[in-house]
Amino acid sequence: MHAEITRLRQLGSDFDDLHSEVRSLALTPGTDARQQLTSKIVATNELVHRAMECLATLDGSQYTAVPGSRPALEALASVVYSATVASSDLAAVLLENPLEGAPFPGPPADEAAVRKARHAEAVPAMAEHLADAAHQLDLAHTGCYYLATGITRDLKQHAEQNQTTPAPKITDSQYAVLARLSAGGGTRYVLSRHGVLKAIDKDRATVNVATLNALIKRGLVAVDTTTSLHQGQRLYVTAEGHRALAQHKLTTPPARAAAVTPPATKQTAGRTR
């Protein structure tokens, strides 16, 4: 999570830099404006992609078990939205930008006057869309820093709460399933032919479904429902599951190995007698 917080801060810084660049653009209608806008649209779309990666990572992490994570994820989705709108606004500037080229065949016209009129009409429209794009980039920048601070606070409060709140009680069989899933997750799926629910760990060893369902119901194991059961749904241990795992004490001690006399010893003992 600390790595994700760092990524969010860097993303916010990059949004801020791009916001400053867009605000300082002095566009003269024509080819030069097209070239400047193209680079800014590409840069904005790259930041959109990075924001979506952050959202996917957080949405599939143990952070979802932390109180306050839902509004944080929604806020990150709004960052994606603002950045996407900024890209659209920049594309609108590009659309308003008059490019030079030959008109359709027709009566001769005063090309200089036509060009002047087109530029006069385009300049205010381009400026309006450019200002909107800068505003959306500023919102994205603010959102990233707000999130980085909020997630840090949520994790700290959650850790403090965990120190005073007893860990969930689990059975030895639930402990065994949690231990296996904590080592690399697992998969829940359904056999299409019979509709039977199955589950496996990362080593493809079968997981008891009844025990798994009990852990899911208690919020100790989470399921990635973005895919169907026929495709397979990823299983991972939540923060509460890790707490239960760390504080559980096995009620049944491991069985002691029975003493076995090696064959060679038996033969020696027989000759001695």
Image: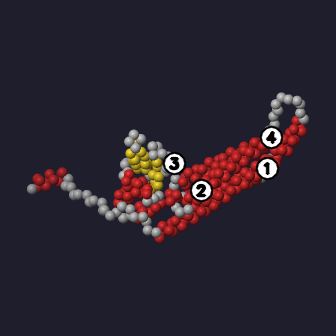
Q: Amino acid at mark 2?
A: Glu
Task: Determine whether the residue tagged by mark 3 lies in a helix, strand or loop.
Answer: loop
Indicate the position of residue 261 as horizontal and vertical percent values.
19, 55
What is the C-alpha distance between the residues marked 2 and 4? 38 Å
Q: What residue would you read off at disc 1?
A: 127
Asked if marks 4 and 1 touch (Cβ < 8 Å), the reply is no
Q: Amino acid at mark 3?
A: Thr
Q: What residue would you read off at disc 2?
A: 74
Mark identifier at residue 98: 4
What is the C-alpha distance between the residues marked 3 and 4? 44 Å
Instruction: Looking at the image, tell me whether mark 3 or mark 2 is earlier in sequence order.
Output: 2
In front: mark 3 or mark 4?
3
What is the C-alpha distance between the residues marked 2 and 1? 31 Å
Q: What residue would you read off at disc 3?
A: 226
Indicate the position of residue 144 as horizontal and vertical percent values.
63, 57
**Depicted 99 relative to depicted 233: above or below:** above
